[in-house]
Image (spheres, rainbow, N blue to C red):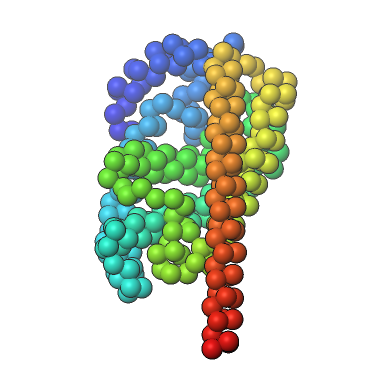
Amino acid sequence: MIFPNSFDLAEPILLESLVLAPQNVEWAQLNPQSGKRFANVSDVYAAIISAVSLLAIRFFLERIICKPIGTFLGITEAHKKLTKFSECGWRFVYYTVSATIGICVLWDKPWIWDVKEIWRGAPLQTLPSDVWWYCWICAGYYLGCLVTVFTDVKKKDFRSKICNYARYPKMATRVFILYVLIWIATRLVWYVVLLYSMLFQASTLMPLSPAFYVIVFVAMTLFGIHLYWTNLLWKIARQSSNDEVRDDRSSDEEDDDEGQQ
């Protein structure tokens, strides 16, 4: 393990100070043992390695693959469009691959289909190796985003933007509709089921600690953010719909003018 001494020394102090463990649970029980893996502060090194690796992949993908594709499609560097296209291309590739891997990794996990299994046996639940790798790869991606956030070109939904930059507006609309539907299904419907289980079922299946109530507060705050973004998506959808109606009317009027001539 990389950096074992520093993390191993800091972990008990950090965890005890945060009062994370419920009663009758000792930190020694959460150390890796007999091939069992638990969530561990020292595993943060995996996110750092993941971030560096993904940034290297991003550098290669944007410059060697995405930019040539953008140039082939006639996208120029005017208003940084080619750079935007390349950055959106990287995000499209990452999220597509990440979502595919996530489905494969999580499909057979019982707590995906029954949220009560999230709490059963906690906090002494073992962490499957495939879930461990998937979580830390995702953590590495967002850690990398913290590094590049100051240099990336600001943009809206990357999937729709790719289609717009490539001059496929109808496809962009369809992708955006699909994105909204997935957002509602995951951020509102499934997440509400999770919140209900957290508020009314968790206490019957696991011993609670003060940190659990902090997690509940964070989860409720995140749901409020979901509602805020849902409202923004609704406004964007209405604006897009109005723009399409105006474009269709303009096209009809042009066709009528050409017919009269």
Q: Name the quarter where the N terminus is drawn.
A: top left
| Residue 138 visible in image | yes
The quarter of the displayed image where residue 196 is located: top right
- Residue 80 shown left or right of residue 239 in the figure: left
Q: Nearer the viewer, residue 156 or 216?
A: 156
Residue occupying image coordinates x 43% and y 69%: 167
Residue occupying image coordinates x 27% and y 45%: 151
Residue occupying image coordinates x 54% and y 50%: 236
Q: Is residue 37 above or below residue 209?
A: below
Report x, y in % for residue 149.
Answer: 32, 41
| Residue 124 visible in image | no
Report x, y in % for residue 75.
Answer: 33, 68
- Residue 7 shown left or right of residue 260 in the figure: left
- Residue 42 shown left or right of residue 118 in the figure: left
What is the count of numbered marks?
0
Q: Name the quarter where the C terminus is drawn.
A: bottom right
Q: Nearer the viewer, residue 235 or 159?
A: 235
Report x, y in % for residue 95.
Answer: 47, 52
